[in-house]
Amino acid sequence: MWEYGAELVELLAPLPSERILDLGCGPGHLTAESRVIVVGVDSAPSMVAQARRHYPSLKFEIADARNLPYHEEFDAVFSNAALHWVRPPEDAIDGIWRALRPGGRFVAELDGKGNIASILEAIKSALGQVQVHMQLTGRPDFYFPGSGEYASLLKENGFSVTLATLFGRPTGLDNGPRGLRLWLEMFATGFLAGLDADPRVEVIELVERRLRPRLYSDGQGTVEYKRLRVVARKE
């Protein structure tokens, strides 16, 4: 999703003199693209290793968004397509506030309320069909807040919020007919974890069967993403 972050970098409007943290930098592509962000962090060692390999002149560190080790070190914290993986969100917001200098800004985009709603509904329905006799409930790994909900969390932690908007971003699936299956195998791990191989395949096939007429047209699949964009300032 890093390609969609260019517009967010424009909203950040970074200055060469600023010290900026990219929270959830992944393999570092957007960190490098910005040409200004000075530190990229991610909780996944594999992602940080890729970022260091691709962009050896930039600084990347392993850090958990729920326990950031910084104190008033940055003029801005930037995050794209990462914070919906962080629970509880209050821990990340607290760490962002501490990492910012007084007057520093927080600019972020994450998945928001209503995101992938049809996919989540289909997964839960399929789990119910396959696992009725077991004590298994799908556990989402993600947090999809509404704009008011997230703005309230920021305000409670000492931020003034200048922007909190929820909008749709339909996004095409790669790999043609196999796109939805690959998406499920990559992003629905919280629901599928603990399933044996056969029930796992059955759940994926049920989801594909239910969603293909809705998400595919002329062989091309589209995921119904909802994005939440926020801009806030540390008081």
Image (tube, grey):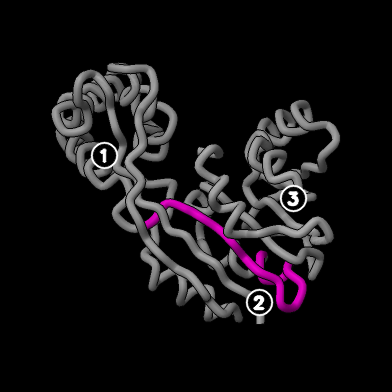
Q: Residues within 10 Å of mark 3 (few under 14, many from 20)?
A: many
For the residues marked 3 and 2, what is the alpha-carbon distance in whole angstroms?
19 Å
Which residue lies under the disc numbered 1?
Answer: 119
Residue at 22% in and 22% down: 205
Q: Which quadrant is the C terminus positioned in?
A: bottom right
Which of 63/226 is in front?
Answer: 226
Q: Is residue 9 left or right of residue 62?
A: left
For residue 133, which quarter of the picture?
A: top left
- Sequence-earlier tag: 3 or 2: 3
For residue 65, which quarter of the picture?
A: bottom right
Which of 15/205 is in front?
Answer: 15
Residue bounds of the magenta highlight: 96-112
Residue at 78% in and 42% down: 60
Residue at 39% in and 32% down: 194
Q: Is residue 170 left or right of residue 126?
A: right
Dot 3 falls on a residue whose secondary structure is: loop
> Could you tell me what secondary structure mostly forms the magenta stretch?
strand
Residue type beneath disc 3? Ile
Relative image position of residue 185 (x, y in whole percent): 39, 26
For residue 182, which quarter of the picture?
A: top left
Q: Is the residue under label 2 in contact with that under label 1 (CB below 8 Å)?
A: no
Which of 186/135 is in front?
Answer: 186
Is 137 colored magenta in this rendering? no
Q: Is residue 220 left or right of residue 63?
A: left
Dot 2 falls on a residue whose secondary structure is: strand
Which residue lies under the disc numbered 3?
Answer: 37
Q: Is residue 68 left or right of residue 221?
A: right
Which of 210/167 is in front?
Answer: 167
Give the label on residue 234, or none: 2
